[in-house]
Image (cartoon, rainbow, N blue to C red):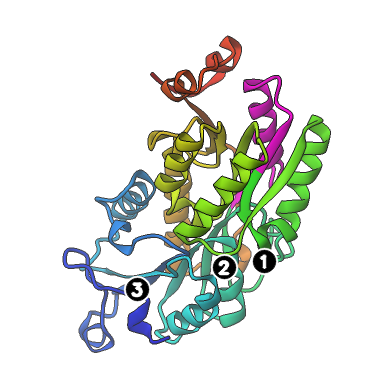
Amino acid sequence: MRRRDFITALGTAPTWPLAARAQQPAKMKRIAFVHSAGDINRISVRGPPFYRAFFEELNRLGYIEGHNLGVDRYSGEGRTEHYAELARDVVNTHPDLILTVGARLSLDFKMATTTIPLVTMIIDPIALGLVASIARPGGNITGIAIAGGLEIIGKRIGLLVEAMPKLANVSYLGSHPFWEDPRGATVREAAKRAGISLSPTMLSTFEKAEYQRVFRSMEQDRADAFMVSDEPENAINREMIVELAAKHRIPAMYPFRDYVEAGGLMAYSSDLADTSRRLANLVDKILTGANPGDIPFYQQTKFELVINLKVAKALGFEMPAMLLARADEVIE
């Protein structure tokens, strides 16, 4: 797949062709922002809160796109079989730094370069084999680790059980690789501790027809509820997932608040705006000369529980008052 299959120039926030880059002043820095599946047109200061906070923080730190900063935007479009090729294409443009979103994509970039600094956001970089140490990652990689690592998955299961005390049968929506790596093992162990039956609902692809298939399967299996993995490939399909959950009337715990804002029931996640500001600060440190391998992964400790009370009422059950009291935000 050729490079143009992966990247589209933005009219208001241009990427920088090689010829144009040669004409930029020496102080111009160039970063590649690579998302596993997101729309590159949303990766801007006018985009969703995660991106907006990132670019606002870069501006606060003195980086102005088009003046002293060039940003190349890429998306893997959820086509996991092409991630390795995308990584090679991006590396061959020789940016000053690569920022990746997505565990699988980050591993492909690790294989593609040992010299260009990589900054990533990942649930547990050690368990997933990205680095050997949080404190001293070594090599060319640093980023944000979700505090507690894979334990956040167990926390989500606990909150779902608290919301639905009679919960017995839960489906877990994720890809085959997710289910087979340490994240899947954590899900199984957390469900066992919670005393619930957990059924993997594995996606072969992230296509619409595949989501429709697995929702029909959940309905046939009479799932009491389901959970969604934090894979970014699911995140770009959140509106479809939320719509299918409403259609099949299955309550769900989601990994990010924007699922709830789109009409989902509840989510427990890291504070993504805070996370993106911290990513911007890591970018600044590296662009001003720090060695990424010497920068500890920041362990995110800010989390938020968001509940959509309208959805709970539509599904015909009441959220426990104590759980509502602990929520950071309740949508009514």
Q: Distance between the residues labelled 3 and 2?
A: 19 Å
Which residue bears the numbered disc 2? Answer: 106
Horizontally, residue 324 falls left or right of residue 237, namely right
Q: Badge 1, how many Cα within 10 Å: few under 14, some, many 20+? A: many
Marks 1 & 2, CB-CB < 8 Å contact = yes
Disc 3 versus disc 1: nearer the observer:
1
Nearer to the camera, 28 or 248: 248
Please indicate whether residue 199 sits to the left or right of residue 193 in the image: left
Does residue 127 appear in this view? no
Looking at the rendering, the stretch of residues picked out in magenta corresponds to 145-171
Q: Splitting the image into 4 quarters, where does residue 329 fall? A: top left
Q: Look at the numbered disc 1 and give the secondary structure of its residue.
A: loop
> For mark 1, what is the residue?
130
Cα–Cα gap, marks 3 and 1: 24 Å
Q: Which residue lies furthest to the top in this view?
A: 321
Dot 2 amino acid type: Ser
**Residue 7 at x, y = what percent?**
33, 75
When the figure is inspected, residue 258 is found, relative to residue 86, above or below; the finding is above
Q: Does the magenta stretch include residue 156?
A: yes
Q: Quadrant of residue 199?
A: top right
Q: Which is nearer the eye, 64 or 229?
A: 229
Estimate how packed mark 2 is, as few (under 14), some (14 to 19) or many (20 or more) residues with alpha carbons within 10 Å: many
The residue where tag 3 is placed is: 30
Helix, strand or loop at label 3? It is strand
Question: Which residue is found at the position 58% from the left and 51% from the top?
Answer: 214
* Label 3 Cα neighbours within 10 Å, binned few <14 / some 14-19 / many ≥20: many
| Whole-number angstrom distance, CA of label 1 to CA of label 2 | 8 Å
Residue flagged by tag 3: what amino acid is it?
Answer: Arg
Spot occupied by residue 245 in the image (x, y as percentages of width and height): 49, 38
